[in-house]
Image (cartoon, grey):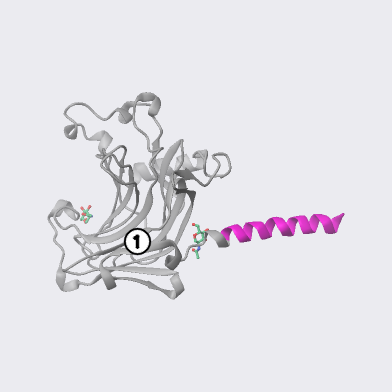
Amino acid sequence: MASSRASTAACFFLALCLSSIALAGNFYQDVDITWGDARAKILDDGQLLMLSLDKYSGSGFQSRNQYLYGKFDMQLKLVPGDSAGTVATFYLSSQGNTHDEIDFEFLGNLSGDPYVVHTNLYTQGKGDREQQFYLWFDPTMDFHTYSVLWNPRHIVFSVDGTPIREFRNRESAGVPYPKSQAMRAYASLWDADDWATRGGLVKTDWSKAPFTASYRNYTANGCVWNSGASSCAMGSNSWMWQELDSNAMNRLNWVQKNYMIYNYCTDPKRFPQGLPRECNAS
Ligand SMILES: *[C@@H]1O[C@H](CO)[C@@H](O)[C@H](O)[C@H]1NC(C)=O
Ligand SMILES: *[C@@H]1O[C@H](CO)[C@@H](O)[C@H](O)[C@H]1NC(C)=O
């Protein structure tokens, strides 16, 4: 009796271990470097990927797999020191001119001045849904985990497990929701000194180049999309119907109250025809 219970427990934990081993990423297997030549480097047996940016080019990579829904985690250590004008990204995107996109963009700054986390969301080719945040830590000192949960109910952006933004599915109010175009994960480091830092006032100081951002432990727990079909049954993943519990809601409210510095829904000047529908829908 006791021994059969013990072996059931052992199998259960073994299964958990195997599934998390399968999840833990390796950049050699999971991504392709798509631009920047030797400015993008995979190191430590595939555990680390460093992107760099100089006067001539940035660099970037994309996931081999495409997904329709999933939970995506990436650990990033952002450009240290003077990063003004540079933007590091981690985002999901489909293709074409009615594409969907879920963006994390990290806007650099002068030494000692705060990074801005810029988020945006495109549905059927239309974006203009920015929210921006400061962080409650220095993102250049250590790796931190930036996550996107994308399921049929909502899209949640999180930092170290704390939700910072939720975009709910409001199709019932006529707001398009990403649900039929598969997306890849992308990351890049590029120069955007025409807008990134203090709206473009602070330019990239090329005497500080090359700029370097580090990526680690990319984990895609998603439904792989292959030849027009999804690899997972809708009911089979814990994240598929996951909602924010009350603790997560409290964290989200804490971030939005204390760290949000821009919200498109409170910027009526930008929308002379009226705020986007999802800003009023409840
Ligand atoms: C850079 O620092 C300035 C001054 O603290 C701040 O206003 C700005 O929001 C910071 N971030 C960016 C990306 O401009
Ligand atoms: C790698 O990421 C997974 C999923 O986010 C997490 O459970 C794990 O602890 C991470 N590993 C390290 C070494 O941070």
Residue 111 shows in this picture: yes
Left or right, 221 with reference to 36? right
Identify the main secondary structure in magenta.
helix
Whether the magenta-drawn stretch holds residue 7 is answered as yes
Report the residue marked by disc 1: 139
For the N terminus, give its image quadrant: bottom right
Residue at 12% across, 55% down: 201
Residue at 19% across, 56% down: 197
Whether the magenta-drawn stretch holds residue 49 is answered as no
The crowding category of the residue bearing disc 1, from other C-alpha atoms within 10 Å (few below 14, some 14 to 19, many at least 20), is some
Task: Answer above or below: position of 94 versus 6.
Answer: above
Question: Residues in magenta?
Answer: 1-20
Left or right, 96 with reference to 75? left
Q: Determine the secondary structure under disc 1.
A: loop
Front in this rendered view, residue 175 or 118: 175
Tell which residue pokes out farthest to the right in this image.
1
